[in-house]
Image (spheres, helix red, strand yellow):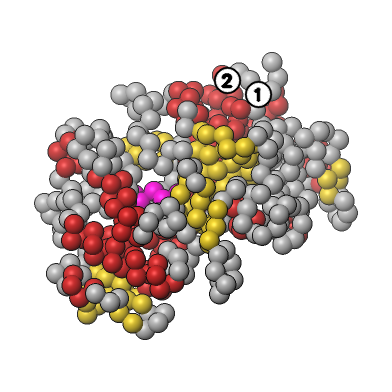
Amino acid sequence: MSRKAIEQVASFSLMHAIMGRRSRRFAVGSSIDSGPLAFQSQKPPQPLNEIERTLIISAMAGNTGWNHLIPFNQKYAPDLPNYAGSAGGRTFPSSAGFHTSTLFFSDDSGVFFLNNRNAPAAKTKTMANELNVEDWLDYNRSQIKQLSDKRIQIPVEEPHIESHNLWIANCPGSLFVVPVVDLAQHMVLMLCYLAQNGYGVYNDFHHEPIPGLDKYKDIVDLKNPFPLSYIEQIVLGEGTVEISTSCYAGSLILQAMGLGGWMYDGIDRHSVFGVSGDPRNKGLGFSSVTRDDWVFPNPVGIPGVFEAFCPPYYSDMKAAVKAVVERKFGPNGPFNEETPGPWKESPLVRKSAKIHSEEFIECVALQAEYIHQKFGKFPGTLPSTYCLTYLQAHHLDLDFYDKYYRPGSYLHTHEDHQKNWHWH
């Protein structure tokens, strides 16, 4: 692969990526057994090389500099709004800068984890705001951790994989990327956000207020609480935005690189996590918590790798709340004056955010612990960790498209991919 290939990606038109984005599913080495588009590839599966893989992962969730935070809220003035969970920015948006998702991916060489949720800004931009792509890839590469030397194991059958994806999903040679959001941490940050703006939560599922919340009437409005059902819908929606826009960013870079693939949700998330109960299904190797009256297990993470901000990784929800507060205000946090930043007076900006008091922490922890005790998990009606949208990338078999499609079914980048990326 030449440097020219990366330069072409860096200069590829955003409009071409948007208008040229398609789900191009037919990979080299694959086959369609029957029907009007029946076809057998005459080429063997071709894994992505390491640079191709790293570029896609970087486009989906790579660090892009400092989070600029929310600069003003008249209710907070002269303090800085103190919502964010991370000081670094990534390639996808996050509500209020919570940044509660991360990235897992798998190919023929194993399963991997991109550990950059709390990473500081990537030092790859010049004063002219130009990006050295190779330096950026090196930076993101340093944050990848290998978890297994085998491709993610998901049985190729229903209900693990939906029938229309059985022939191609997670196929040999492909890259399978899974953004995962920690809904437990997102819920804690949401409870903080509500309390910061004077609101508490009411359990509308059981039609009861949270016992003991009246102690914190100086922090939250007891007469106008938010329904728990509504708040958890927002948490799920905001988490889904993170993981879905990550996949969309990945789908755009596929066009620039000339790779096939698509974003989709046609694999059962319990199978992806590896908590389906099928012994053949190892998935990502997540742990889960079960209860007799639950329809589904509750995936909580991988010990020492990705742990939801709730029990069993914390003794109780107060400990989890304190950990979230430490993430915000502790070393490298967005509201720690020693954390560098994009402002001319970054220490002054960061320390202007109001630190959560012990009373505030207790108020949030009371609500979080009530939810955990009442429902047996946290959040109460959502899984603690969640995935929905995936990205698959693979080398496209142009013969299939040339046989069945009119000209224009793929871009010039697809036509030139092998020459640009694999010929020496």
**Which amino acid type is marked by label 2?**
Lys
Could you tell me which residue is drawn at 44 percent across and 41 percent down? 91
Kindly identify which residue carries mark 1: 420
Q: Is residue 304 above or below residue 165?
A: above
Please indicate whether residue 73 sits to the left or right of residue 310 in the image. Answer: left
Q: Which residue is mark 2?
A: 4
In the rendered view, does 356 fall on the left or right side of 8?
A: left
Which residue is at a point 43% across and 38% down the rendered structure image?
116
Q: Are marks 2 and 1 in contact (CB under 8 Å)?
A: yes
The magenta region covers 96-101
All told, the count of numbered labels is: 2
Q: Quadrant of residue 3?
A: top right
Give coordinates of residue 5: x percent, y percent.
Answer: 59, 24
Q: Quadrant of residue 415?
A: top right
Q: Residue at x 30, y 24 (%)?
A: 127
Q: Is residue 58 left or right of residue 26?
A: left
